[in-house]
């Protein structure tokens, strides 16, 4: 294939993520005119990374982080958005890595990009661990926003297998709201450092979310 065809085909494949709604929102029957797509999640987590780097002055290469986050959902163009409640980590890793390898094999820089994807997936370098924490926290913050809008009815989750997960059910049975449940689930499950934990706690404690308006100069 020509370089021009490679550019277009790669763009066309990634463009699919604009129309793929995040599986978690579908599982919880989020009722809203527009529900977040995978592409919108990618944007959101990149913006969160910029803010976290700014306010907490992490000693990391933020450009590398932004690149990692740009491609961290690349495999989902092929395998779809599979949650941790649908497939084991090992199973997902196997099929996702194969998908990413196939997607990038035709690009000249494909091997370098694949190495960056695998680095993110390992969560071992400072940039990868930072990016991973951003990825998880962004989802919990989005939960808070949907919960604030009243988009989820916990009394109508009959076909939601995630709601019957032991950890999830225990938190909900204790009287937690949907977003508080996810905030606490993330705090227990993910390797948040003190800064990410602090932001998670702050968002969890918000009672009223102000509407920010963009003003024309």
Image (cartoon, helix red, strand yellow):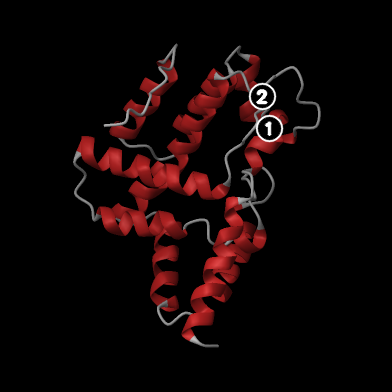
Q: Is residue 34 left or right of residue 111?
A: right
Residue 105 seen anywhere in this rendered image of the structure: no
Asked if the residue under mark 2 is in contact with the one under mark 1, i.e. CB atoms within 8 Å, the reply is: yes
Q: From the image, which quarter does the C terminus lie in?
A: top left
Numbered badge on residue 77: none
Q: Is residue 81 left or right of residue 161?
A: left
**The image quarter in which residue 146 lies:** top right
Q: Is residue 209 left or right of residue 24?
A: left
Q: From the image, which quarter does the N terminus lie in?
A: bottom right
Secondary structure at numbered mark 2: helix
Q: Mark 1 — residue?
A: 165
Q: Residue furthest bottom?
A: 1
Within 10 Å of disc 1 (Cα), the crowding (few <14, some 14-19, many 20+) is few
Q: Could you tell me residue 26's position as x and y percent?
A: 69, 37
**Residue drawn at the location 39% of the way across and 62% of the way down:** 119
Residue 216 seen anywhere in this rendered image of the structure: yes
Secondary structure at numbered mark 1: loop
**The image quarter in which residue 191 lies:** top left
**Residue drawn at the location 59% of the way across and 71% of the way down:** 98
Q: Could you tell me residue 46's position as x and y percent?
A: 38, 47
Q: Mark 2 — residue?
A: 169
Q: CA distance from mark 1 to mark 2?
A: 6 Å
- Closer to the camera in the image, 123 or 140: 140
Q: Residue furthest front?
A: 217
Q: How many marks?
A: 2
Q: Could you tell me residue 129's position as x and y percent?
A: 36, 50
Asked if residue 66 is positioned above or below residue 10 in the image, the reply reads above
Within 10 Å of disc 2 (Cα), the crowding (few <14, some 14-19, many 20+) is some
Q: Could you tell me residue 183's position as x and y percent?
A: 49, 27
**Residue drawn at the location 72% of the way across and 29% of the way down:** 164
Q: Is residue 179 left or right of residue 128?
A: right
**Residue drawn at the location 42% of the way across and 20% of the way down:** 211
């Amino acid at each position: 294939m020509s370089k021009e065809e490679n550019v277009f085909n790669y763009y066309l494949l990634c463009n699919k993520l604009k129309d793929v709604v995040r599986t978690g929102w579908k599982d919880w029957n989020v009722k809203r005119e527009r529900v977040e797509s995978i592409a919108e999640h990618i944007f959101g987590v990149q913006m969160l990374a910029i803010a976290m780097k700014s306010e907490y002055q992490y000693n990391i290469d933020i450009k590398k982080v932004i690149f990692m986050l740009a491609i961290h959902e690349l495999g989902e163009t092929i395998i779809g958005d599979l949650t941790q409640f649908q497939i084991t980590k090992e199973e997902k890793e196997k099929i996702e890595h194969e998908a990413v390898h196939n997607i990038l094999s035709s690009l000249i820089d494909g091997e370098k990009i694949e190495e960056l994807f695998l680095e993110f997936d390992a969560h071992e370098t400072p940039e990868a661990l930072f990016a991973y924490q951003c990825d998880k926290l962004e989802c919990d913050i989005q939960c808070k926003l949907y919960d604030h809008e009243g988009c989820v009815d916990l009394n109508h989750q009959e076909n939601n297998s995630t709601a019957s997960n032991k950890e999830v059910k225990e938190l909900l049975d204790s009287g937690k709201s949907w977003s508080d449940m996810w905030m606490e689930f993330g705090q227990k499950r993910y390797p948040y450092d003190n800064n990410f934990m602090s932001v998670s706690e702050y968002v969890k404690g918000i009672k009223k979310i102000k509407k920010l308006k963009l003003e024309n100069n």
